[in-house]
Image (tube, rainbow, N blue to C red):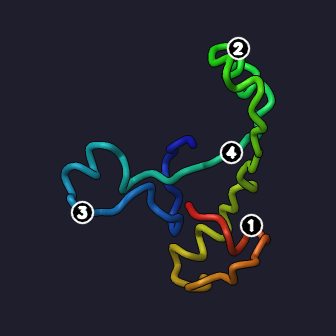
């Protein structure tokens, strides 16, 4: 995640309160850009190299879906579903900012 200057109308990187703390960290004047990469193959190889017991363990991989900025903006604007269905797989309804 990269915090960058917020454009008019975009969701904020954090809450406005406490004002001094959030202003000092840039949370009220910035927004987030998020990229989710699946690096599980290289990460798992590295873990197995350093923790030999993992070599014989079956590891189930469940990478996150791509982050949906439009859905995050909808939630910020108050236009998102309150409770998406349990079986939802569409990133527009299942991701969070």
Above or below for 67 versus 90: above
Task: Please give left or right for residue 16 compared with residue 46 in the image.
Answer: left
- The residue sitting at the top extreme is 49
Choose mark 3 or mark 2, whichever is in front.
2
Choose mark 4 or mark 1, whichever is in front.
1
Mark 4 and mark 1: Cα distance apart in space: 13 Å
Whichever of callouts 1 and 3 sits on the residue coming sooner in the sequence is 3
In the rendered structure, are the residues bearing label 1 and label 3 in contact, judged by CB atoms less than 8 Å apart? no
- Identify the residue at horizontal 70%, vertical 45% (top origin): 36
Q: Secondary structure at mark 3?
A: loop
- Identify the residue at horizontal 24%, vertical 63% (top origin): 17
Mark 1 and mark 3: Cα distance apart in space: 29 Å
83 or 78, which lies in front? 83
Choose mark 1 or mark 3, whichever is in front.
1
- Identify the residue at horizontal 68%, vertical 17% (top origin): 52
Residue 17's mark?
3
Q: Where is mark 4, residue-wise?
A: 35
Whichever of callouts 3 and 4 sits on the residue coming sooner in the sequence is 3
Whichever of callouts 3 and 2 sits on the residue coming sooner in the sequence is 3
The quarter holding residue 91 reads: bottom right
Mark 3 and mark 4: Cα distance apart in space: 27 Å
Whichever of callouts 2 and 1 sits on the residue coming sooner in the sequence is 2
Q: Where is mark 1, residue-wise?
A: 91
Q: Quadrant of the C terminus?
A: bottom right
Within 10 Å of disc 2 (Cα), the crowding (few <14, some 14-19, many 20+) is few
54 or 97, which lies in front? 54
């Amino acid at each position: 995640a990269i915090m960058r200057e917020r454009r008019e109308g975009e969701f904020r990187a954090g809450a406005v309160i406490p004002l001094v703390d959030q202003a000092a960290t840039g949370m009220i004047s910035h927004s987030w850009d998020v990229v989710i990469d699946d690096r599980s193959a290289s990460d798992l190889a590295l873990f197995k190299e350093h923790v030999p017991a993992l070599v014989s363990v079956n590891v189930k991989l469940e990478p996150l879906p791509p982050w949906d900025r439009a859905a995050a903006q909808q939630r910020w604007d108050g236009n998102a579903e309150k409770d998406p269905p349990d079986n939802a797989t569409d990133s527009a309804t299942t991701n969070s900012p």
